[in-house]
Amino acid sequence: MKKLGLTLIIILFSTFSFGQVFESTGSGSSQGADTAKKIGVMDAIRPPVDGVYEKKHLPNYQPMALTPLREADVLYSNLTWRVIDLREKLNLPLYFPTETKGNWKSLMQAILDVTTDTSEANPNPIRVYSDEYLRTPYTVEGIRSSTGESFTQNLVNEWGEDTGQAVLFSAWGPREVYQYLIKEQYFIDKQRSVKEERIIGICPMFWYEPLNPSAEPEGDEMSSVTTRRWRNFGWLYFKEIRPMLAVTEVFNPQNNGQRRTYDDIFALRRFSSYVKGSENVYNNRGINEYIVNGMDQRLKSEEISNDLRKREHEMWEF
């Protein structure tokens, strides 16, 4: 009899203890506890970790520090415009993933998150400028309108009568970004006896399918066999987006435990690109404005790059 009484006491005590733990880990109210009981789950004690360990260092990363540069130490300087084509194998980490995977996201998705998000999590959206000289910033509505194409379509009823017009908007996403234009300054620092390139601005380029293929291409675009068109998203001041780049990781196919960030990719110049133009007296015209053939354009691009390398070589005495 004593054993039976002791067993009943233990069962009652265990039931009471479970109820206390449930209330302490639940939503904090009787209503929340009742809801949890109905669905048979409890609130998580801590957020789940996507992996076997929690990444605590990444949110605290800072952009790689640059060596201070004085105007008096610049022996030679030149502006160049480069194209990063994401269809090249070395540049694939900038294009993928096409859909966000936790903190792993494409470069364009990271840019959209800090330029179009106006929530409390992003109180100061990064500005996007309409020109490469970073003079006129877009509004948030202007940024969103630049990520798609509007097209006016006539509405016709079942009897063939015009009933009005409708404005259609075709939105583009990170999948449509296949190139980045970068404006950078090449200089020789006589104080350190080094040549260096630093990015000033970056501009994503959309490669999209127009809603009205019969329309003429905008700007200086030449007609081609494909109906697709190029359109720029806008220019971003590179220094403003570096804090974001420093906390956004890039996939590392060699070692997933040692992922790099986008700031590392650009600081270490782990990307492939070609010269689109160099500053000149002819309104800084690009190579494609005075050379038509594609192969000749590439040869001219290599010639400009070689000239810059020769200037560095000529600094040294042997």
Image: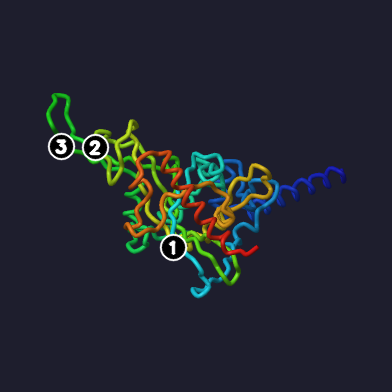
Q: Residue 222's image quarter?
A: top left
* Quadrant the N terminus occupies: top right
Percent coordinates x, y for residue 179 in the rendering = 44, 45
How busy is the neighbourhood of tag 2: few (under 14 within 10 Å), some, or many (20 plus)? few
How busy is the neighbourhood of tag 1: few (under 14 within 10 Å), some, or many (20 plus)? few
- In this orientation, does residue 49 appear? yes
- In this orientation, does residue 120 appear? no
Q: Which residue is mark 1?
A: 123
Percent coordinates x, y for residue 259 in the rendering = 64, 49
Q: Which residue is mark 2?
A: 215
Q: What amino acid does circle 3 point to?
A: Gly
Q: Which residue is mark 3?
A: 164
Q: Are marks 3 and 1 in contact (CB under 8 Å)?
A: no
Closer to the chain start, of discs 3 and 1, is 1
Q: Nearer the viewer, mark 1 or mark 2?
A: 2
Q: Is residue 239 left or right of residue 144?
A: right
Label 3 secondary element? strand
CA separation in Å, label 3 and label 1: 40 Å
Q: What amino acid does circle 2 point to?
A: Ala
User: Residue at coordinates 38% horizontally, 48% vertically from top-left?
Assistant: 287
Q: Residue furthest top?
A: 159
User: Residue at coordinates 37% horizontally, 51% vertically from top-left?
Assistant: 286
Q: Are marks 2 and 3 in contact (CB under 8 Å)?
A: no
* Quadrant the C terminus occupies: bottom right
Of residue 243 and residue 32, the one placed in the foreground of this image is 243
Label 1 secondary element? loop
